[in-house]
Image: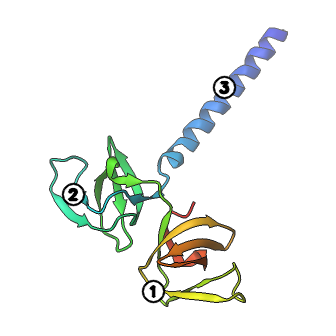
Amino acid sequence: MQIVKETAFMLKVTAFFCLFVFLIEPSYAKDEYYLTLRNDKANLRQGPSFEHPVKLVYKKKFLPVLIKDKSDNFRKIIDHENNSGWIHVSQLSKKKAALNNNADNSIIFKRPSYYSKPLALVEKGRLCFVKKCEVKWCKVTSGDYTGWIIKSSLWGKIK
């Protein structure tokens, strides 16, 4: 009788585990994440192979891109202007960088507070290298300036 109860319990645990894995796996596989371009020149292709024609050539190192899908050694990306296509993994980097995506100019502050000293205005589309982030602020370097910018104004790899 004890063996039957243990077997039934193990079957329930196994069924629950399988159900959990199969329900969670599809959402896990569709995660989107940011990377940056590794080189000054990177080809965006219409499909996931070198045989597909080049759609666009990026000429900005560390430009952030959003990874949407993968196929073998290619990643489907979307850039800040909603251009999409496929790029080879050798052209991607994990360097933390983001673009100022605020319609107005953003301000780099000395400390993570609106009441601290403003250091510089950052125009829309300006590339910022992210040092670290807190809840609402990120410490960035852009040009000769290093300071804090509001996190919601950044588009790119900040984690």
Question: In the rendered structure, which disc, 2 or 3, sits on the residue that comes first in sequence?
Answer: 3
Residue 20 lies in what quarter of the image? top right
Amino acid identity at mark 2? Gln
- Give the side of residue 15 with respect to residue 29, left or right: right
Q: Secondary structure under badge 1?
A: loop
Mark 1 nearby-residue class (10 Å; few <14, some 14–19, many ≥20): some
Q: Nearer the viewer, mark 2 or mark 3?
A: 2
Find residue 63 and report its horizontal and vertical position in percent.
38, 66
Residue of label 1: 123
Q: Secondary structure under badge 2?
A: loop
Residue of label 3: 14
Question: In the rendered structure, which disc, 3 or 1, sits on the residue that comes first in sequence?
Answer: 3
Residue of label 2: 46
Where is the N terminus found, in terms of image quarters? top right
Residue at image location 33% in from the left, 48% down from the top: 90
Q: Is residue 101 above or below residue 8?
A: below
Residue at image location 47% in from the left, 77% down from the top: 143
Q: CA distance from mark 3 to mark 1?
A: 55 Å
Residue at image location 67% in from the left, 32% down from the top: 16
Amino acid identity at mark 3? Thr
Q: CA distance from mark 2 to mark 3?
A: 43 Å
Q: Is residue 157 above or below residue 1?
A: below
Q: CA distance from mark 2 to mark 1?
A: 31 Å
